[in-house]
Image (cartoon, rainbow, N blue to C red):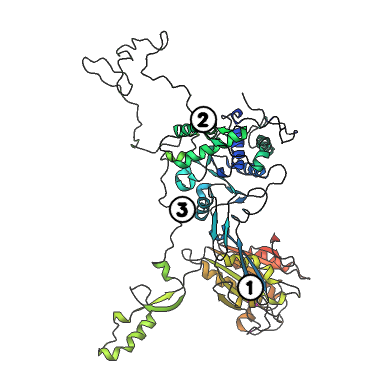
Amino acid sequence: MAAVPPDPHTSPDPPADQGTAPAGTVPHDDPAHRLGLALVCAAAEPALSGVLLLDLDPRLVDPVARLFGAVLAGADEPARPPLVLGAADRDEDLWTRTRIRGGEHGITVRTGPGPLTEGDDADGAPPLVVVPDLARLSVAGMRAAVQLLGAEVVTVERGGPRRTVRPRARWLAVCRSADVGRVSRHLLDRFALRLSVAGLRLPVPGGALEEPGAQEAREALLAGLADTRRPLSGRGVRPVSVDDAAIGRARELLGPDAGVRRELALLRLARTLAALDGAPSASAGHTDDAARLIGVSVPHSAPERAESDPEPPGTGPDPAGPPGTLPERHGTGGDGRPRTRDGARGLLDTGPAEGIGTAPGAAPSPAPGNPYPEDEPAAVRDAVPLSGPRRRTTGPVATRGTVIGTRRATDLRDIAHVRTVREAAVHQRARHTERFTVSPADLHSNVRAAAPERVLVLLLDHTCRAGDANWPEVLAPFLQWAYTSRATVQVIEVGAADAADELRAGSFTARSVLDPRVPAALHRRAGRATPLAHGVELAAQALRRLLRRPGTGPAEAWLVVVTDGRGNVPLRAGHTGRTDGEVAAAGVEDAVEAASRIGAMDRTRLHVAVVDPGREPYGDLPYVLADRLGAIVVDGRRGPGTEAAGE
């Protein structure tokens, strides 16, 4: 008997005398109803916190995630926005959250709990973590899932803060069956609730998935599946016992090699279904319902007749069998295939046909609907999927950093010629040789600093600073990114009152934003001249040096320009240090021309932002500069978080 969708106009709370619909009424051949019931079970039982959907249509990831959030929140409160994890997440982004505050006495850094743990001690609905593609999840995200899913208590000790929490978050992950082989088995075992939804095609009256309104119709249909169980999932279900018959049935269905985690997951799902049905304990029937829900094949309760047993009279083929074969009752071999009459010898039939060129033992494709496709060797597995890639510290890459010193050489790579000649010259008189001799003991090699992986370039125009301007607050998002990613900071200053040459831009390089020179540069007094064109040219030269080597350059770089665009010093004056006659608009034009060179650089690794202080008149100059730079514009008057595309 098919289940009837609930009436959306009725109250989601069922009457006390009616209870909830039994789990067995859900048609297990309908992927939409199976998905709705699975999400309700995951919301009601913390032990089923991990849900893995196999072969879900990418267009349905967002509506399914919103449905899961609504089930977790219940009917009395709005759903919380989910945390989406992907391939670019790092440990610093998941476990801790850094906040930077600037003041006159320096930059203050405070570290608090990250998005994975900050909602575990809060009241309300459990948080939701969504992984759109589990095979492409970063190593940091995979390790976090292994540590959190199924754990009762987690202690986080990272970068100062120490916190012990009880994980409450629910994880919703999506993966293709063909990509499961690339995922660690330890990670897959953490997802207690797995089901294949390859056939999930939510019906839209008279239309396909691409028709207008199909997305809303799918979400409405999914939302109606869990309305009757949402009150139960919001406050959980009472735990019920599991009888011995249910445990034995789980072992029978999963097989002897399934492992303890799969048996526990199936029994916990059966226990949740029993609690939703109002049963005092979970029986073997609830185990069968749980197996059907996740897609495990459930055999009939009555034992099937063996193939070699005699058939009842009047049924089946002729007892004599086809001409040339013995009757099936007496003529089958050990494998059940008929034997032919060939004198005193019995010859077996030919086996199944094999395609030409088929390699023996070739990996078959995963069976459709199987919740455990990793059991089938469908893909080559990674040896260490939970380990990050090793960084190369030797070879040609190690000889391309900035020279910071010398040391005694251990090989002939990257020899420091000046230091080697000096060491050899000291010992020439003692060696009594006619020619200049270099001994192996004289050889020294260069010591180079590692090339930075991320760089922040700040171009600060001090003449645009207003009386109430708070540059540390405006630049806080960029400083926080540089701090968490350990980026090298290069500061280019224009128009400072204490500049060595007011017609030229000055610059310095710091290892991090914690360098005392960085906060000092954010609070300098304004001068008279604005060599903006020279500052933009220095920024272009610095970025060109960083990005010209694809193999050793930074993986990501930010250029942040704080200016009102009013450059009153031409580029020639910045080069020579003296002015020639009237300036007019030459300084602005030179700055825009220098900015066009940055706009033509590789934008796959370079990001540019212009902070507009909002000064009038000529308020359009920052936008003209941003257009040539290919940058976004940040409103410097309202602080961070307000961005607009440069025009």
Name the residue carrying label 3: 386
Q: Counting residues from the N terminus, which is met first, the one under dot 1 or under dot 2?
A: 1
Establish if 396 lies above or below 68: below
Range of the magenta residues? 493-504
Q: Nearer the viewer, mark 1 or mark 2?
A: 2
Q: Along the horizontal axis of the image, is 246 left or right of 22?
A: left
Q: Secondary structure at mark 3?
A: loop
Q: Counting residues from the N terminus, which is met first, the one under dot 3 or under dot 1?
A: 1
Name the residue carrying label 1: 107
Q: Secondary structure at mark 1?
A: strand
Q: CA distance from mark 3 to mark 1?
A: 36 Å
Which of the labelled discs sits on residue 267, or is there none? none
Establish if 165 lies above or below 289: below
Does residue 455 appear in this view? yes
**Mark 2 residue crowding within 10 angstroms, few (<14) / some (14–19) / many (20+):** some
Residue 114 locus on image (x, y percent) = 60, 58
Name the residue carrying label 2: 284
Point out the residue furthest to the left here. Answer: 344
Residue 502 magenta:
yes
Q: Kindly indicate the quadrant of the structure image that contains residue 239.
A: top right
Establish if 239 lies above or below 447: above
**Mark 1 residue crowding within 10 angstroms, few (<14) / some (14–19) / many (20+):** many
